[in-house]
Image (cartoon, rainbow, N blue to C red):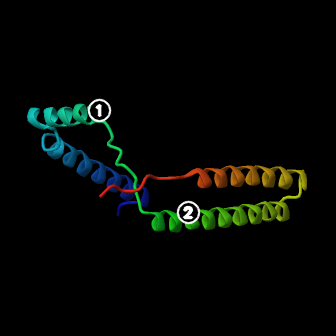
Amino acid sequence: MISVGHKIMLTVAVVCAMLFALALFGYRYWQPTEQEGQGLIDFMLASAESQPVELPLCMDAITKERIRVIMYDALDEALKDHIAKMYEVWMKDDRGQPGRAVTGTKQGLKAYLGARVSVDKWDPPPCGN
């Protein structure tokens, strides 16, 4: 009879031998050919040289105002979420509170007001037909 330790060692040896055999079998199979390697290099060079194309953003007045309303609604919702998060943190960890909550809320308000100014100034050109 073979002991448990010998069975484990035999299993490990068989598994290692199988992995080694698979590695030898697949070694040549996974090696790129010269042509494949060159194609990859050409693709990488072409990708590095390409410049992003920025499409002109144009829209009619009705669409512009609908998007502006969506932006304002998103800003309002984001501010509500941020302030709720400040209170959640306060309830979980009262170290340094309420100062930390006040600081986080002030930062959120500053970002909110700055974003509202940006939405107010946002004015994409009308599309020329």
Report crowding for label 2: few under 14, some 14 to 19, many 20 or more residues within 10 A (C-alpha). some
In this rendered view, identify the residue nearer to me: 67 or 90. 67
Query: Of the residues under marks 1 and 2, which one precedes in the sequence?
Result: 1
Nearer the viewer's eye, disc 1 or disc 2?
2
Residue shown at 37% from the left, 49% from the top: 56
Compared with 84, 41 (above or below) is: above
Q: Position of residue 120 (x, y in %)?
A: 61, 54
SS for callout 2? helix
Q: Amino acid at mark 2?
A: Arg
Quadrant housing residue 79: bottom right
What residue did someone put label 2 on? 68
Quadrant (top left/top right/bottom left/bottom right) for the N terminus: bottom left
Q: Position of residue 115 (x, y in %)?
A: 64, 52
Residue shown at 72% from the left, 61% from the top: 82
What residue did someone put label 1 on? 48
Quadrant housing residue 71: bottom right
In this rendered view, identify the residue nearer to me: 128 or 106. 128
* C-alpha gap between disc 1 and disc 2: 36 Å
Q: Position of residue 96 (x, y in %)?
A: 90, 50
Disc 1 + disc 2, Cβ < 8 Å: no
Report crowding for label 1: few under 14, some 14 to 19, many 20 or more residues within 10 A (C-alpha). few
In this rendered view, identify the residue nearer to me: 22 or 126. 126
Residue shown at 15% from the left, 38% from the top: 32
Q: Amino acid at mark 1?
A: Ala
Q: Position of residue 90 (x, y in %)?
A: 84, 61
Q: Which mark is residue 57?
A: none
Left or right: where 81 falls relative to 15: right
Residue shown at 68% from the left, 49% from the top: 114
SS for callout 1? helix
Quadrant (top left/top right/bottom left/bottom right) for the C terminus: bottom left
Left or right: where 42 falls relative to 54: left
